[in-house]
Amino acid sequence: MFCEMEPPARESVKRMNPSLWTLGTTVICVKISTGDAQPLNSLASWVDGDSTFHLQPRDETYLTNSTEGDAAIDRLQECGTGGSVWKLGSEAICKVKSWYEGRQLEATTIDFVRKTCPEVPMAEVIYSWIDRPINRTFLIMKRVQARTLNTAWPHLSAAQHMNIAKEVAHHCSSLARITSSRYESISGCGVYEYWLMGKLPASNPSWFYMTVGPFSSIDMKTYMTKISCEILPERPISRVSGLPPNPR
């Protein structure tokens, strides 16, 4: 069921003026000159040129005489009804996602991968929190100054394509060595896996992502046997155009 969050996810971050942003209901981001006195209640900070950005607990005195703010000016991406991404200056981004009790936190997953597979490059997390009154998480990360692979790919040579493919395969192999006897996230939560969820109820809000599990190996096997009532095809269908079906 198509359903917006309240307030909509795309309104989660607003620029109030050139040096002030509201991040949900509990945090503000303040930009000050690096040489100025640093706030004592700073939750996290990062340097951006001659300025320093500070995350602070929301203080309404900062918002006195402010406008309603602009949520679109710094928005980089709108991800349906369940989240959006904003830039905070040129050195950080803010990623907002819908949240509910029992959903895995992305910052925790990033930290786990960094500690378990240090050879796999991961984004640097500056700060993360849950804004429970509005059911969403906020993740502040260092911004990578580069082109996206989608943009760069057409301009790369065949050798560069192959090197990238090999590097990605190597990282996938490293991650595949992390195993568990249970089907669950690293924090024991259910796993968001669209292809294993079966048919979602029509009443499910579009921002409320369903998860599978957590399951023991036995429960997972039982679940997989009941995930679909469709009749199995008689013969496998080839996914490569022009090739006959695989033999029995």
Image (spheres, rainbow, N blue to C red):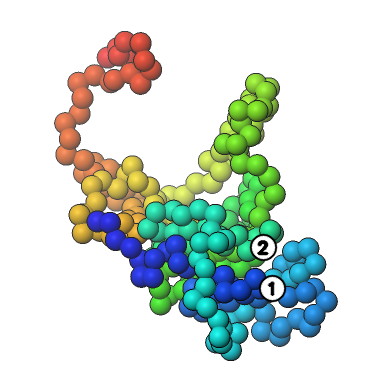
According to the image, label 2 marks what residue? 89
In the rendered structure, the answer to whether residue 91 lies left or right of residue 86 reads right
In the rendered structure, the answer to whether residue 222 lies left or right of residue 242 reads left
Seen in the picture, residue 248 relative to 222 is either above or below; the reply is: above
Q: Residues within 10 Å of mark 2 (few under 14, many from 20)?
A: some
- Verify CB contact (< 8 Å) between mark 1 and mark 2: yes
Seen in the picture, residue 157 relative to 92 is either above or below; the reply is: above
Determine the residue positioned at 72% across, 67% down. 46
Name the secondary structure under disc 2: loop
Residue 167 or residue 73, whichever sits in front: 73
Residue kind at label 2, given as amino acid type: Gly
Residue 172: x and y, percent? 56, 38
Determine the residue positioned at 29% across, 20% down. 237
Q: Is residue 23 visible?
A: no
Residue 89 or residue 107, whichever sits in front: 89
In the rendered structure, the answer to whether residue 72 lies left or right of residue 144 reads left
In the rendered structure, the answer to whether residue 175 lies left or right of residue 137 reads right
Determine the residue positioned at 21% across, 59% down. 203
According to the image, label 1 marks what residue? 31
Q: Residues within 10 Å of mark 1 (few under 14, many from 20)?
A: many
Q: CA distance from mark 1 to mark 2?
A: 9 Å
Residue kind at label 1, given as amino acid type: Lys
Seen in the picture, residue 241 relative to 119 is either above or below; the reply is: above
Name the secondary structure under disc 1: strand
Determine the residue positioned at 52% across, 68% down. 70
Residue 6 or residue 239, whichever sits in front: 6
Look at the image and tell me in which quarter the N terminus lies: bottom left
Residue 86: x and y, percent? 56, 60
Residue 162's image quarter?
top right
